[in-house]
Image (cartoon, grey):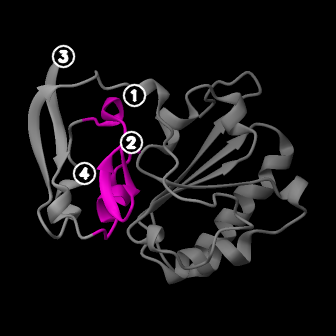
Amino acid sequence: MIRKIIEIQEEKCNGCGLCASACHEGAIGMVDGKARLLREDYCDGLGDCLPQCPTGAITFVEREAAPYDEAGISRLRQWPCQIKLVPVNAPYFHKAKLLIAADCTAYTYADFHRDFMKGKITLIGCPKLDGADYSEKLTEIIKNNDIRSVTILRMEVPCCGGLEMAVKKALQNSGKFLPWQVVTISTEGQILD
C-alpha cells in the first residue's frame, strides 16, 4: 500500500539517538551509530521523530510500505521499568507523563499497552511482593524531574492499596501540584472507575 512513512538519510545522521527515543512505536533504532527505520509496519506516519532530529536527516515520503500495525507494538519507552530498579534521574523523565502500575494490571487488562502505556513512562511494582514502600523513591522522581502528570493503575484487590498510598504520599511530599488519577481494574480485567 502507498502511505506516508519516514525516511532517514544516513549521511546526515549524527547518531544522537533523539529520534529513536521520540518514536513511541519503536520503529526507529540505532544500528552502528546511525538511526535506522527498523520496522516500517511500526511507523505510524505521524512523525514524532522529525522535530527531534538536529540535522534534518528525517523526512516524510509517500511510498509502498507495509501497513501500520498498531496491534503488535510494545509501548514501553524506557528500561528498566520496575520501580525498585529505575534511576531517580533519567532523561526519559523530562516532561514525562507517568504511569505507575501494579504488576498484575498488565496481565489482567488485555489492552494495557494500547490504552494505558502509549505516550507515558511506565513504572511497575507490587509493594506486597517487593516488600517495599515506594513513596521515598517516587517522591524523588517527582520532585527532581519535570513530570507532567501521574496515572495510578491498580487492581481492585486490597494489596494494591499500598501502591496507591505510596504514589499519593509521593505526590504530597514532592511539593508539586500535578494532575493525577487512579484507575482501578477488576480481577476480570474491566475498568471499574
Q: Is residue 121 above or below residue 14?
A: above
Q: Badges 2 and 1: C-beta atoms under 8 Å apart?
A: yes
Magenta residue check for 110: no
Horizontally, is 39 left or right of 79 in the view? left
Horizontally, is 157 left or right of 85 in the view? right
Q: Report the residue marked by disc 3.
A: 1
Task: In the displayed orientation, state which residue is furthest to the top.
Answer: 1
How far apart in space, not on screen, are marks 3 and 4 (Cα)? 22 Å
How far apart in space, not on screen, are marks 4 and 1 (Cα)? 15 Å
Horizontally, is 174 left or right of 137 in the view? left
At x 85% / y 48%, what residue is drawn?
159
Of the numbered discs in the image, which one, if any, rests on residue 70? 1
Task: Residue 1: give x, y in percent of width and height.
Answer: 18, 16
Task: Residue 87: give x, y in percent of width and height.
Answer: 62, 75
N-terminal-most mark, 1 or 3: 3
Q: For the residues carrying marks 1 and 3, which lies nearer the camera in this image?
A: 3
Q: Report the residue marked by disc 2.
A: 25
N-terminal-most mark, 3 or 4: 3
- Along the line of sight, which residue is nearer the eye, 110 or 156? 110
Task: Residue 115: give x, y in percent of width and height.
Answer: 48, 34
How far apart in space, not on screen, are marks 3 and 2 (Cα)? 19 Å
Q: Which residues are magenta?
A: 15-44
Identify the secondary structure beneath mark 1: helix
Q: Report the residue marked by disc 4.
A: 48
Horizontally, is 154 left or right of 152 in the view? right
Q: Quadrant of the C terminus?
A: top right
Identify the secondary structure beneath mark 2: loop
User: Mark 2: few, some, or many residues within 10 Å (few <14, many ≥20)?
Assistant: many
